[in-house]
Image: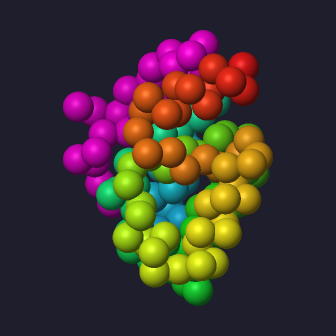
Amino acid sequence: MPDVLQDRAGVPVLVCDPAGPPIASERDALDLIGAAFLGATAVAVPADRFDPAFFSLGTRFAGEVMQKFVNYRLRLVVVGDISAHLAASGALRALVAESNRHDHVWFVPDLAALDERLAAAG
């Protein structure tokens, strides 16, 4: 499935293809942001598309990507099981918990959980 703009709980979301290209650089993140300008206010990216450096906070890659989305006023949603990454990093657990308390970056296990969050936030 290609990346597709979907209405999810009344919110236009660019739902990214799980088989799409990896997100391994700021340029890759900017490409997603550009695609979102078709009308999305959120971008749902499968966790498996992120380079493992995203989940290793010492690389600062996650912070750079998240900041790009904030700057362009788009919500970034990381969708999928990241439990192995969370088990390996207390700092990542703290980041995920803090992010999920706010509106700019969310980590959710699946699209159904995203729909619930969007409906609750709506």
Report the span colored magenta.
1-23
Residue 100 seen in this snapshot: yes
Please identify the quadrant where the C terminus is shown: top right
Question: At which x and y percent is residue 35?
Answer: 48, 37
As displayed, is residue 119 above or below residue 108?
A: above
Within the magenta stretch, is there residue 15? yes
As displayed, is residue 105 above or below residue 64?
A: above
Question: At which x and y percent is residue 71?
Answer: 75, 51
Q: Nearer the viewer, residue 2 or 81?
A: 81
Please identify the quadrant where the N terminus is shown: top left
Residue at the limit of the structure toward the front, as seen here? 87
Q: Residue at x 61, y 47 (%)?
A: 106
As displayed, is residue 11 above or below residue 2?
A: above
Q: How is the image coloured?
A: rainbow
Within the magenta stretch, is there residue 95? no
Q: Is residue 19 left or right of residue 49?
A: left
Q: Residue at x 76, y 46 (%)?
A: 102
Number of labelled discs?
0
Specify the quadrant of the image occupied by residue 5. top left
Q: Residue at x 62, y 60 (%)?
A: 96
Q: Residue at x 57, y 16 (%)?
A: 9
Residue 38 seen in this snapshot: no
